[in-house]
């Protein structure tokens, strides 16, 4: 009976036009999102020492909680002769070993999540774009900070409460036993009130795209958001079919690396600005781009971002390595120094926007998205964009899609979809450029009509099937 009363109260609140749209939109994602959003609106202008003190307080509280309530972390700290009082700041986190997906799978759920809480929570999974999906439990407080961070990011780009967000993301399967009222409240919370429309990034055929465009055109003030590959596909479909272009206020991208070539394509196709963001399914709301476009602002009120090398040691600002992320708000299943496979680097510079939030560079891919040449040279995904442009393949032959796969140290499979077949000279120039930089390799050039995406709808442009560097 109590749950029914609470549900009725929520319906009434969400549908009440006298309550500001901002309040109702935030409430649709959680009872604490509005409170978190108001905090983040203020904290982005705090001084760097103020932000650091706030972050350190949250670090100390999280570590104590994990030690007292999570068997995995209690055992881990004891093994390394650590007590909660030894971890008082973000810098002290380096004393704790990193958390890997293997650690989670081996200890999930009993040893790594709170037994009293996870039985009542929905089971979450990652998209599995690089392998087996990871199972985990989310946390209401962490979700609140993440959604607040997302709305703060949208406000930087020019979002006004009530603007429609058209998102091209992976399809989340519905439970077979869902009742009507569950779907109805889900419609109110995740679609009607915040004005968000979801389009399946895994289903981008002509019929689906035509339907998506007709739906998007019905909205007056709208935003496009989603996977880079999905938005590129949408842009090319509109151009090739001679359809009147869409005119979003701005575009936000996520989940895949946004190259400068991709950014330029989206800007030219939709005649609006493009803003990148970084997060992962396990830890949302990590970092976002402001109008200065000089990097990503880390949501330090919510996360700690470190960069480590293959020995799990921190590297200097400006050096690339694996990201180790700590979610300061997930007390149900703490992610402390979590290695998710993404590569990046921290930046020591200040942003001209005036915010004191620390900065990181645009994420350069995943640890399985790097190629190691026979000569020992290691290159990231965006490196091949440069080679393709220098060989004239990017601009001269309307490249629509590509995938670089390394199955052996001395073999590269280069799969392409072109608008028109490239010349032998351009292909050979690309081969030679690869060999000049990576050493003597067998470079297989393959032409396709379409390169399949992963089940999640994401495109992995670079894929290494040999041991990664980290």
Image (cartoon, rainbow, N blue to C red):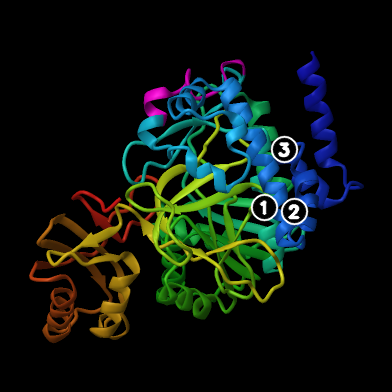
Q: Are marks 3 and 1 in contact (CB under 8 Å)?
A: no
Choose between 377 and 52: the one closer to the eye.
52
Residue 377 sits in quarter:
bottom left
Tell me the mark number nearer the camera, choosing from 1 and 2: 2
Q: Position of residue 139 (x, y in %)?
A: 62, 32
Q: Which residue is mark 3?
A: 30
Q: Is residue 32 magenta?
A: no
Q: Quadrant of the N terminus?
A: top right
Q: Secondary structure at mark 3?
A: loop
Find residue 149 and name its label: 1
Q: Which residues are magenta?
A: 104-116
Q: Position of residue 124 (x, y in %)?
A: 50, 32
Relative to 255, residue 186 above or below = above
Q: Which residue is mark 2?
A: 40
Q: Are marks 3 and 2 in contact (CB under 8 Å)?
A: no
Instruction: Name the residue at 63% across, 69% down.
Output: 290
């Amino acid at each position: 009976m109590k749950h029914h009363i609470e549900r009725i109260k929520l319906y009434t609140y969400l549908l009440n036009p006298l309550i500001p749209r901002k309040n109702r939109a935030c409430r649709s994602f959680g009872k604490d999102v509005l409170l978190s959003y108001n905090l983040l609106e203020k904290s982005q202008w705090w001084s760097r020492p103020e932000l650091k003190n706030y972050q350190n307080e949250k670090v100390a509280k999280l570590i104590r909680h994990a030690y007292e309530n999570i068997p995995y972390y209690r055992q881990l700290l004891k093994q390394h002769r650590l007590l909660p009082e030894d971890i008082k700041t973000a810098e002290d986190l380096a004393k704790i070993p990193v958390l890997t997906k293997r650690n989670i799978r081996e200890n999930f759920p009993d040893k790594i999540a709170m037994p009293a809480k996870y039985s009542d929570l929905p089971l979450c999974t990652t998209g599995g774009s690089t392998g087996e999906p990871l199972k985990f439990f989310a946390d209401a407080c962490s979700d609140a900070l993440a959604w607040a961070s997302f709305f703060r990011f949208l406000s930087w780009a020019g979002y006004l409460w009530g603007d429609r967000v058209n998102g091209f993301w992976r399809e989340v399967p519905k439970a077979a036993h869902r009742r009507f009222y569950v779907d109805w409240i889900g419609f109110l919370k995740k679609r009607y009130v915040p004005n968000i429309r979801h389009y399946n990034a895994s289903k981008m055929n002509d019929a689906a795209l035509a339907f998506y465009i007709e739906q998007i055109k019905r909205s007056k003030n709208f935003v496009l958001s989603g996977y880079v590959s999905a938005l590129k596909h949408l842009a090319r479909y509109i151009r090739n079919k001679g359809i009147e272009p869409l005119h979003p206020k701005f575009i936000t991208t996520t989940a895949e690396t946004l190259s400068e070539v991709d950014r330029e394509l989206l800007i030219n196709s939709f005649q609006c600005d493009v803003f990148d963001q970084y997060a992962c399914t396990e830890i949302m709301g990590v970092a976002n781009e402001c109008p200065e476009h000089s990097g990503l602002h880390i949501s330090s009120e919510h996360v700690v971002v470190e960069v480590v090398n293959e020995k799990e040691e921190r590297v200097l600002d400006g050096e690339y390595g694996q990201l180790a992320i700590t979610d300061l708000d997930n007390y149900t299943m703490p992610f402390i120094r979590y290695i998710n496979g993404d590569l990046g680097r921290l930046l020591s510079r200040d942003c001209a926007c005036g915010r004191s939030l620390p900065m990181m560079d645009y994420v350069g891919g995943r640890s399985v998205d790097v190629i190691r040449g026979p000569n020992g040279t290691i290159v990231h995904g965006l490196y091949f964009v440069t080679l393709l442009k220098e060989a004239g393949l990017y601009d001269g032959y309307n490249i629509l899609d590509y995938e670089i796969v390394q199955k052996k140290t001395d073999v590269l499979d280069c799969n392409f979809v072109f608008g028109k077949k490239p010349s032998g000279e351009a292909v050979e120039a690309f081969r030679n450029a690869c060999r000049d930089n990576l050493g003597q390799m067998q470079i297989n050039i393959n032409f396709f009509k379409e390169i399949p995406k992963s089940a999640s709808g994401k495109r992995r442009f670079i894929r290494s099937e040999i041991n990664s560097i980290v």
